[in-house]
Image (cartoon, helix red, strand yellow):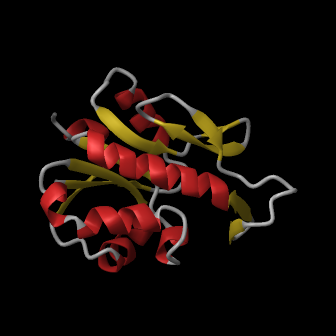
């Protein structure tokens, strides 16, 4: 089942998810929390975290608005998401937004997941999407069977 966890910008979606996954060992995927004003990738299963923002020396970046994200960081995160897709029955991707609508960011791993219809039927995929981008995201990635949630505790597994 695909669950789309949605809400407004800065409404605490990532923080709520992080609290929800802390007590579990059966979930894989990536969260993108903010710490000390900087975005970073957090691997849910391993606990590893690394910068999502490009440093000044990086030449290959993904730019969206005022943000400069690390292309290398996203490549690693996509690899970790696909690894989670193979190993776990619950996979989180935080978040699918404007970058992915431009075929960057998490778009590569989400496309692989969405195209594997057989495996996708066997897992629960939790996507974080801002409510103002919900229609665009579901259309772009061909999502027709999904459940929109605004409270992470609405997922019962």
Give the total number of marks visible in the rendering: 0
Q: Is residue 133 above or below residue 70?
A: below
Q: Is residue 93 shown to the viewer in this render?
A: no
Quadrant assignment, res 155: top left
Q: Is residue 70 above or below residue 35?
A: below
Q: Is residue 8 shown to the viewer in this render?
A: yes
Task: Looking at the picture, tell me which residue is in the foreground, 135 or 99.
Answer: 99
Residue placed at 63% from the left, 43% from the top?
40
Residue placed at 13% from the left, 50% from the top?
122
Query: Image quadrant for the N terminus?
Result: bottom left
Which residue is most to the right?
Answer: 57
Task: Looking at the picture, tell me which residue is in the foreground, 36 or 49.
Answer: 49
Compared across the picture, whether 21 is left or right of 46 comes to left
Q: Is residue 1 above or below residue 137?
A: above
Please provide percent x and percent y for residue 6. 37, 55
Query: Image quadrant for the C terminus?
Result: top left
Residue placed at 68% from the left, 59% from the top?
69
Please provide percent x and percent y for residue 94. 45, 50
Please provide percent x and percent y for residue 87. 28, 40
Please provide percent x and percent y for residue 33. 57, 41
Residue placed at 72% from the left, 65% from the top?
61
């Amino acid at each position: 089942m695909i669950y789309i966890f949605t809400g407004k910008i800065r409404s605490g979606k990532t923080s709520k998810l992080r609290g929800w996954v802390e007590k579990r060992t059966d979930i894989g995927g990536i969260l993108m929390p903010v710490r000390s004003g900087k975005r970073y990738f957090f691997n849910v299963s391993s606990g590893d975290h690394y910068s999502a923002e490009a440093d000044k020396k990086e030449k290959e970046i993904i730019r969206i608005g005022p943000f400069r994200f690390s292309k290398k960081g996203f490549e690693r995160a996509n690899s970790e998401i696909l690894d989670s897709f193979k190993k776990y029955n619950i996979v989180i991707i935080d978040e699918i937004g404007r970058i992915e609508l431009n075929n960057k960011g998490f778009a590569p791993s989400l496309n692989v997941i969405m195209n594997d219809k057989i495996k996708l039927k066997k897992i629960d995929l939790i996507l974080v999407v801002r409510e103002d981008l919900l229609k665009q995201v579901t259309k772009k990635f061909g999502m027709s069977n999904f459940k929109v949630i605004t409270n992470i505790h609405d997922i019962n597994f």
